[in-house]
Image (cartoon, rainbow, N blue to C red):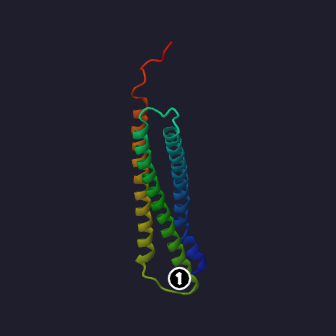
Amino acid sequence: MTTPSEALLASVAPVTLISGVGLVLLSMTNRYGRVIDRARDIAHALRHGGQPPHGARTQLHILTERAHLLRSGITWAVVSVMFVAVIVGLLFTGSFFETEYPHFLPGAVFLASLVSFLISLTYLLRDLGRSLEALHLEVKDLPSKPAA
């Protein structure tokens, strides 16, 4: 049995993970918003006869893929935070209600949280790769030297 103060000490590492995941979530949601805005701008130009960017349909395809990658990454990051919340809940309910959980349970849930976070980061890296491909498409037909 643990005391509430021991449960609080044991929850410091998992709660620190929430902070780190939160910063990554902030980055991913900002990227997601920019992808959606860019896709809307291109779609608007295509629909209303504006001047769409070079390779607009290919860019829309890449932006759609990126949005799916980012949404998946965001989902896995949220799952990671939810696992951490379960850990903290286990630690405190065990302490306050004098409930004994198997010793491996908090560790197993923490490991699940870390795996979820790693999956989330994998989706973020895949998005970064696709964004670089989109950039190459955008600049490939530009002259190598600016016009004088």
Residue closest to the far right:
5
Q: Where is residue 126 in the image (x, y as percent from the top left)?
A: 39, 48
Amino acid type indicated by mark 1: Gly
Q: Position of residue 118 (x, y in %)?
A: 41, 58
Local secondary structure at mark 1: helix
Q: Where is residue 27 in the image (x, y as percent from the top left)?
A: 53, 50
In this view, 65 is above or below 132:
below
Residue carrying label 1: 94
Q: Which residue is drawn at 41% across and 72% down?
A: 108
Q: Which residue is drawn at 42% across and 20% down?
A: 143
Horizontal side of 28 relative to 69 (left or right) equals: right
Residue 128 appearing in the image: no
Q: Position of residue 64 (x, y in %)?
A: 43, 48
Horizontal side of 127 relative to 36 (left or right) equals: left
Residue closest to the far top:
148
In this view, 3 is above or below 114:
below
Count neighbours of disc 1 (C-alpha within 10 A) and say few if under 14, some if 14 to 19, many if 20 or more.
some
